[in-house]
Image: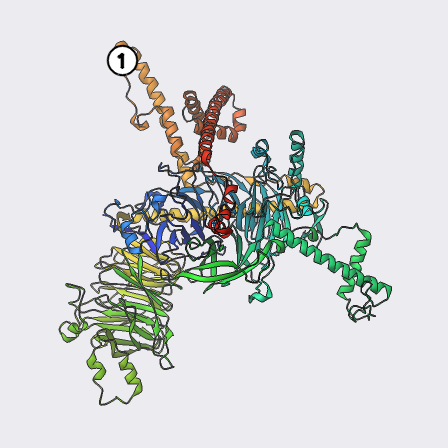
Amino acid sequence: MQHTYLRYECADAFSLVTSTTSTSVPTTHPLAFLHNNNNNSHNGSNNNPTLLLSTAGSQIIGFNLRTINEPCIKLAHRESLSGGLGTGKGLNSHQVTCITTTSSGDSGNGDSSGSGSSNGSKVASGWIDGSIRIFDVHADDLPSTSTSSSSSTSNNKNAGIVHSLLFSKPNSNGEEFVSREPLLLNGHNGSQITCLSFDNDDSTGGTGSGTGTGSYGGSTRLASGSSDGTIILWDILNETGLYRLLGHSGPISDVSFLPHLSPSTSASSTRTSTSTSTSTSDQFNGLITSSYDGLVKVWDLNAQCCIQTIANHGGQVLSSTVVSLPHNDGDNDNDNGEEENENKNRVRVRVRLVTGCIDGKVRVYSIQQSKRMTIDNTTNTEDNDDDTPMPMPMPMLENEDKVDVNVKSSSSSNISVSMDDVCFFMGNLPPPPSNSNVIVSHEKVVKVEYFTSTSSSTMYFGYLRNNSKMVDIYTVRSVKDALAKKKRRLRRRREKDKKENSIASSIHSGSGKDKETGMEQPEDKKGKKRGILDEEDDTTSKVIDNNASVSTSTSTSTDVELDQIKSSDEYVYACTVRASHKIKSFEFTNNTNDGKVGAGAGSGGVRIVFALATNALEVHSIKRKKKDDSRSSEEYEFTTKNVSSMDMYGHPTGIRSIALSSDDELACTVSKNIAKVWNVGNRSCLRSLPLTSSKSSKRGSTSSSYGLCSVFLPGNTHVVVGTREGYLLVIDIASGDIVFTEKAHEKEIWSIDIKKPPSFGSGSNQYDIADYNDDEASGSIAIVTGSADKNVKFWEVETQGEDDSSSDEDGGSDDDSDNDDKAGLHIGHPMLVHTRTLESADDVVCVRYSHCNDPAQKMIFVSTLDNQIKVFFDDTLKFFLSLYGHTLPALALDSSDDDAILASGGADKSIKIWGLDFGDTHRTMYGHSDSITDLKFVKKTHNFFTSSKDGSVRYWDGDRFDQILLLNGHISEINCLAISKTGAFVLSGGMDRQVRVWERTKDMVFLEEEKERAMEDMFDKVDNQKGDEAGTERLMRRRKEEDQLEEDDDGDDENENQPQSAAAVKKSQLSVSSGDRIMEALERADQELKDAASFRRSQESKGKYAKERMPSPYLLGMEPPQYMLWVLRSVKSAELEQSLLVLPLHYMERLIFYLILLLRNGQGVELCSRAAIFLVKTHQNQLVGHHKMAIPLRELRRLLKLRLSEARDAIGYNMAAIRIISKVSSDYKSRYHIPDDFAKKDVFGGLGVGSDMAAALQRKN
């Protein structure tokens, strides 16, 4: 009979605020804001506050910035094991790498549950396995109140705080995650998703980079970039990939949709209704991508090709963003008629591209219409409206034949502006001024971000450098101020050129006097004789070159930068925000205190949220106010303030130890200088305890300690922590104070274990330690520690009392140090008293007590650095056994409850099972690919868990010597394990700073099935590697062919024919299984038709006694065409094309037959049309040569044309009706609408209250 086990699955993960990626390609979008578009909320009175989403390992967690201590929502998908194994409810084992958000909108409701709520948001997440999942988060799923973590966990069942398979809530039917499954998009061939961006068609400004700060209504397209250099455009409504863009050779760092550069926008006047209704064909549908290959590409999505490549970066482009700057230039700029005439035909919409590069420079580009687009629009406009002013094609350039001096190759050869170029260089972002007390760094720029303040309509821009604690903040000037800055810059340049020309003319004339002033020039300005070894004077050479250019050119300057708006004209440095630790990423948000009394109306404040490298969040406030001595209205001073920080929920470094309380309700996790106590039930952090030792070299000083091991004392009120410095710390959980400190060892304390009295565990957990110490029969509470100082020390737990502090009054009252120690006693709290010491020949790595209750049979297991495991009796410390076999030290030890076997895991990756009667080796097992860090037995069994540095947890059978389960989920090495008393759950913690909860389910585990699944996974990995190698070989072969073609004369013509886009499909197990299901359905449908025909023939002779045939249960009671439609609908939309490719030719012919039957009845027109067109396009060559398919193809063509025309007419009729209803509704609402211009008038001027009241009310509105 085959032995079975119960399956363990990951139920939840906690103690992680922001996760670090485990690959060499870091993500640039770990943060995003989840905006709730609730129509019932006005003036910021929203019951569902704005939430900050963060990538946290295998899930996305959301924090309320008002109550930032605990997460209020978790988003994740369930793990689906191959072969249908498992419960299907476990937390996934992959890692989320980037996220972005958008509002669902009224038209973009892709809710699979059919709730129809338009007040939700979509959260797109990219995963390390190349998949994209889009979550629908509705307003009902968010926490309605800003309560504490404990109340929200217990009352809000939709928040998804706890995803538990064991402890289910009474009203949730065991389902604690939101029941809606996310939309799965898979097409990147297993490459890590590095960036995501929603289409910003409906955005009214703000960011367009897809980093999550913008809120777009009804976005239907999503662009994704991966580490293999491919970009895929997805249709969210149809749940399929449109196409794949090829061209980058390195990982994609950012993707951004371009705002439509339509020709209907002008600065002088708005378009009429005929000109504003520009067709989509007149608009430029573009996408900008940046990559680690140092290129920034502009793609025309209509033509699916690259129209511009920017290659003037000094290396890898790590970040980029596209934004439409706000229209805060004003409409009443009639003071200077010359400026009005000059800017009359300029484009009002300012679209900017900003890139951050590895060379530390931030480059700014202006995005305009291309020459080709402008020429086409001009031709079309001259035929329709001759009086409509057209925008200039390149308003930043003076002449069309000028050269962009900044778009140069490494050899400094000029590259002419192409007819399709839309990006034009504006210059590098100016560094912070010298008086800002900011050290200018040249580290690579890893993050750039825009944000528009809703209170003041001020555009903020910030960028982050690698390994930096600072973010530099800039503000964007309005068009009016930018032009004024440009005018002042040009005036200063003309004055400087005029002065240099006069100096040059005086030098050539031989006079040292200035022609204008007649004054003697200084020595450095006069003409001097220059020796052979003297260097050429820069000023003189510059003047001579300038004179030469003036004599050979027209009166206009040849430098293109002089007559364009540079980045220094638009961007002005505001401030620098400093965090407490290194910053991984940041995100802007509006200041929630702007509308409060005393916050300062119109202060234009924003908040910036930092994701720190210490697994914490910080919120800083940026406020501005006008300078007191400022003469210009645009000169402000900015102040920053640290508003709040969230460092309680996560560990700053890797978790080194986990300890469970005796009742399995509390868990203590220890890391560098921090110990945290958690509630295992709701995953909330109860206490964050700093590890400080009061005993140091200086009297009265404290120093932080690095925690390495921990254990709960009986009663679960105190925790003992061993540190790297050799201290033992006793911490009171209730108060969070360290009640006892002892210098136990001279070096690191690597291991600690506790021996509880036999009578402990009966009755209540509340006890008095003195009761056990007074009762000699019950035994005492003992602790054993093993250290690198080659000593194993034994300690007894006693209670600190008043008699202890006064027992030595006669003998040692004059010793100051003893008095200080006695004065620091905490009455009533436990203390550790050293009793015995066991010396070892080498460093002690691990020490454990046996589980026997008989004091005479109690043993101690000691593992040392010399690869030995020694067994001693506890009462006498007499040597019993010495276990040899490990080639490297055994890092983990544990014995079964009956002390029959001892299991050890070593740094040699092996697990050994020892018999404790003679010390023989029962079996040596292998499975881990790295050192084994911890080992724990399940109570009352011989099954045990092991953790390793390879990031996996394995479940073993110690009697049959088999591996039962392999549990993956950690992204880094695992250091520690903790198992509950009943074995119901297991906690694992590692260097990725997260704790994963593995809970025992009711699903049965069969070892043969697990072995088959492991073999399938191994074969799939090999196939994927072969596919990647084949793709690499194809890429290298294509590059070689391109190099050879470049050497030929006609090589350029051949390169132009290379494809720049491909189908966004991917072959997967799901698509293959779907194809098999379609073929099986075709066989069943054909068989049903044959059976029905034979049944009719048999019943024809019976006449009126003929029977009616019952529907076939194999077809679920449906007719064959309807059954085929049901099967096609069961296939995911993204997998349909790949599933149809699996069909052989004769199956394809049968499927076309059923599609014709369905189209005749008008059933499933859209799905049948899509499938039929794809089959005809794919198998065109075979169908053309097949004469039997001529008549079905003609019939299919007729039906497609007929049914699609009917569907088009129905959709057009419905859209026209919706437009009429919308127009009637808007006209009804605008009957009593007060225009915005009326609110700007000073209606209080004649009432005696002055214009200050009007200004205050306007700021309030």
Q: Is residue 36 left or right of residue 351?
A: left
Residue 914: x %, y % from top left: 27, 65
Secondary structure of the residue carrying tag 1 is loop
Along the viewing direction, whichever of 389 and 703 lies nearer the viewer:
389
Where is residue 944 shown, x and y percent of the image?
Answer: 28, 59
Residue 878, located in which quarter of the rendered image? Answer: bottom left
Q: Is residue 520 left or right of residue 190?
A: right
Where is residue 855? Give x, y as percent: 17, 72
Q: Position of residue 1243 (x, y in %)?
A: 49, 45
Furthest toward the right, the residue is 509
Q: Is residue 36 left or right of residue 781?
A: right
Give the residue pinned by disc 1. 1106
Q: Which residue sits at x=32%, y=66%?
A: 892
Residue at 14%, 63% in the rendered image: 763
- The amino acid type of the residue labelled 1 equals Ala
For the question of whether residue 961 can be seen, the reply is no
Along the viewing direction, whichever of 792 and 397 lies nearer the viewer: 397
Q: Is residue 658 above or below residue 62?
A: below
Residue 623 in view (yes/no)? yes
Of residue 742 and residue 657, the one placed in the foreground of this image is: 742
